[in-house]
Image (tube, helix red, strand yellow):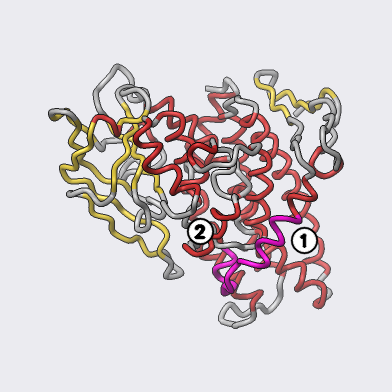
Amino acid sequence: MRHSGWLYRGCDSLQRARNITCGPVRRWQIAKVQTFSIHPFCVPVDPGELRAEIRSFIADNRPELPPESRANSWAVGDAAFSRALGRAGYIGMTWPKAYGGHERHALERYIVLEELLAAGAPVGMHWIADRQSGALLLRYGNEALREKYVPGMAAGEIYACIGMSEPGAGSDLAAVRTAARRKDDGWVVNGQKVWTTNAHNAAFMIALVRTSEGEKRQDGLSQVLIELDRPGVDVRPVIDITGGHDFNEVFLDDVFVPDENILGQEGNGWRQVTAELSLERSGPERYLSSYALVTALADHVRHAGNEQAVALLGRMVAETWSLRSMSMSVAAKLAGGDDPALEAAIVKDLGNGFEQDIPRAVQAVIEGVDLADDEEFVRILRTLLMVSPSFSLRGGTREILKSIIARGLGLR
């Protein structure tokens, strides 16, 4: 990479006044083809005050959780905590007030998410609804769907799931085979979705289905909202290696979907879903999924005096900060109305590699660690050793991401 331009002033960490003036943008030229720009993360409120506010809320409302749950908190749901967040105005922060939202800046929301994840708060119940499904309904749903679902989502009472991945297709969304065929005033859907996070708690699934055929595989795909209590919907649990129930399979057998449940334009699903994935791929969960182990390692080395572990901790903190800067830049671009799909894919690919390396690296430098031990540090390490391989399934496998990056850089 070749650096050109100026270092930017980190508005969140260095600028504490309102009406912040941000410094110049930092840019790297990649292979003289594509520019990755680090955009200033400028929040229209005092970020220090907002962080103090959400930290106080977490201290007062977070339930007692075992170390295993804190280690993987954005996959852990707690309905009471989600409702408390909704009452406090921390869900649907950017949505219109007419639909239960709060019309706050997108980067204020980013700060809140970062604090929730860093604290190991159980946000899994409402996570998908808040991150992308609510925004999708507001943009592409009709008025009836918005009124039916969005206020309850903002209140932390209605949850959603995403039907993208399929057996035999994985993250290759163009290979989707779940099909919808025309019938009267709607569609009949048949197929199967897998790795469907939180489907067992969700009121509806926004699914990518094939409504027609076209010249390219990406043609003829549409997004539809499927209520999960409809006849023909069968949600089956996928239990992970730790015994946790986060993922599901969803079988769709002649499920009727009315015309009004088509989101956006019929046949425009590919374009809509790739824009949606930028929201999923670049958030703070892309560098904080193993953060509980980083903080646990810091506590451990404070007493153990392990020089290798201290050096590893320093490298982890430095890489976390770098990934955080990249993630915040993508968030800033999204807040500005851009669709940084390439940058989001880069953040997710780098973040997945980093988060999956953390537990193995920690295990390697802690001498004599017994994974059967009941110490909190070991319980966090044990959990992340088991669940971290799944991190690269969420939002696109690394092979798919590398293909996106290669195309974005003009390499294929």
Instruction: Give the amino acid at mark 1.
Output: Leu
> Considering only order in the chain, which callout, 1 or 2, is on the residue closer to the N terminus?
2
The location of residue 273, given as percent across then percent down, is 43, 32
Identify the residue at horizontal 60%, vertical 50% (top origin). 90
Please state the horizontal and vertical placement of residue 95, each as a whole percent of the image: 54, 38
Q: Quadrant of the N terminus?
A: top right
* Label 2 crowd (10 A; few <14 / some 14-19 / many >=20): many
Residue 382 sits in quarter: bottom right
- 210 relative to 100, above or below: above
Residue of label 2: 83
Seen in the picture, residue 180 relative to 199 is either above or below; the reply is above
Residue named by callout 1: 313
Residue 231 belongs to magenta span: no
User: For this view, does 65 lie left or right of residue 19?
Assistant: left
Secondary structure beneath dot 2 equals helix
- The location of residue 229, given as percent across then percent down, is 25, 52
Comparing labels 2 and 1, the label whose residue is closer to the camera: 2
Label 1 secondary element = helix
Give me the residue at 70% from left, 69% from top: 296
Q: Position of residue 217 (x, y in %)?
A: 33, 25
The rendered magenta stretch, by its main secondary structure, is classed as helix
Q: What residue range appears in magenta?
A: 52-72
